[in-house]
Amino acid sequence: MQNHGNLLFWRDLSPHSAPLHAPTQSSPRVLIVGGGVTGLVTAWTLLDKGYHVTILAKDWATYGTSQRLTSQIAGALWEFPPAVCGQHTDAISLQNSKRWCMVAYHIWDAIAASKELSELAGVRMKCADFFFPVPVEQDPAQMSKMLEIIASGVRGFRRDPAIIAERRVDQNYGAVDAYEHLAPIIDTDVSMAFLMRLVVSKGAKMVTRSISGDLLNQEAQLRAEFNADVIINATGLAGTELAGDDSCYPIRGGLIRVVNDGSDFPKLDAALTITADAVHDSSEIVFLVPRNDNTLLIGGIAESHEDQLDLTLDSPILKRMRARCEAFLPDLKKAKLDPAYPLAQGLRPFRQRNVRVERELRPQPSASTPSRIVHSYGQGGAGWSLSFGCAGDVAALVEEALLDLSPRPMMIEVAADKAPASVMEPTGLPLRAESDFRARL
């Protein structure tokens, strides 16, 4: 089977400044390329395992009026896949992300359980409400997802059409069914600052620098320069260049930020969504997420292959988005824009194939051992939801790389008693036989 590294808070991760396991002079040294949530959570995980960690990034989180990191722009509502704003529908991503997201759920939940940690990390557990235009039983995909959520271990699940009136949703919008559960909602600016402080306090070195070109072609040089045993690629959209992966592409998103302090309309303290797949029309998505600082995010849009951050509040797509959300929740017609930061926009880093948490499969040039590059990118709009789950698997892959074991491609895991005679790899080529398939897992 694949080597998973499911993390538990306090057992594997500590919020204290000292690492759980102090590194020694001979402890492995890791270079992480990428300073977003994926890179920082991976760094936290490896630091607490006793590794020496250097994080290299072109940009870090900023808190002014200039463009912020994609990790800061994210809505950061934890979601069970397939996510509201997600495009991950391939079997490999869905299978892994259902496990990854539950690892992250329990860790964020544990952080939110402490008042002090909750405030420091910007994480709170709030109701996430999902609305549907037909009874859930009439939509097999949504019914299946709901049953998986019930069985997943989330807290506070309730299915009740009365939620529609409770949340003041317009009865004429078309929602007839709803359910809710508790979910982590993360104030990304606060949480990014927390993660950066934490990894530095645990011993991470931060290097501001841009890298261009395929990492594989410069692996030996980078490892020598940073005295690194392993390199981790957590660069998001830069995977196109750094991993030689032309399947990466951006999906532009935009969020309108309004004041949610109760002065202009009843304060909304739950996330409200209608999924694109539920209404079978991506233009109908409603995505309302209350942040922890009296700000409400109004979304959402998903523009594939749009790579320019040139949206304004007058852009037609944003005007339609706000009108759609106001029709869904009429109270929003009274909402005032956040005067300091009314519009957030960013590029979600997607991949045409599956989310990639995998060792480099290409042979290292002029080397007799496998590459020691580990990739973690393509999470798209689900970086916060998948963060700790992906980091645990990366840590397990790092251990494999240190042993110079042969890398294995990501694939669908099939239970022994249900393994088919032929299974398709991500490349589309059939694996040979059932016994060979199991041997490669």
Image (cartoon, rainbow, N blue to C red):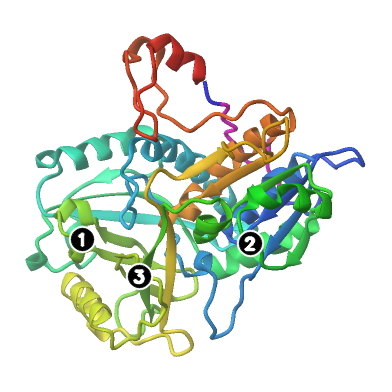
Earlier sequence position, callout 3 versus callout 1 = 1
Q: In this rendering, which labeled residue sits more in front, label 3 or label 1?
A: 3
Q: Position of residue 285 (x, y in %)?
A: 23, 63
Earlier sequence position, callout 2 versus callout 1 = 2
Q: In this rendering, which labeled residue sits more in front, label 2 or label 3?
A: 3
**Magenta includes 169?**
no
Left or right of residue 271: residue 206: right
| Residue at the (46%, 84%) spot, across then down | 341
The reply to whether the C-beta atoms of the residues labelled 3 and 1 are less than 8 Å apart is no
Left or right of residue 4: residue 209: right
Residue under label 3, please give it: 306
Magenta residues, start to end = 3-14
Determine crowd level at label 2: few under 14, some 14-19, many 20+ residues with C-alpha closer than 10 A.
many
Using the numbered discs, state the Cα–Cα distance from disc 3 to disc 1 in whole angstroms. 16 Å
**Magenta includes 12?**
yes
Against 241, is 329 above or below? below
| Residue at the (82%, 50%) spot, across then down | 224
Q: Where is residue 187 in the image (x, y as percent from the top left)?
A: 51, 66
| Along the line of sight, the residue nearer the viewer: 250 or 190 | 250
The reply to whether the C-beta atoms of the residues labelled 2 and 1 are less than 8 Å apart is no
Residue under label 2, please give it: 35
SS type, badge 1: helix
Against 406, is 40 above or below? below
Amino acid type assigned to the residue bearing label 1 in the image: Ser
Residue under label 1, please give it: 282
Amino acid type assigned to the residue bearing label 2 in the image: Gly
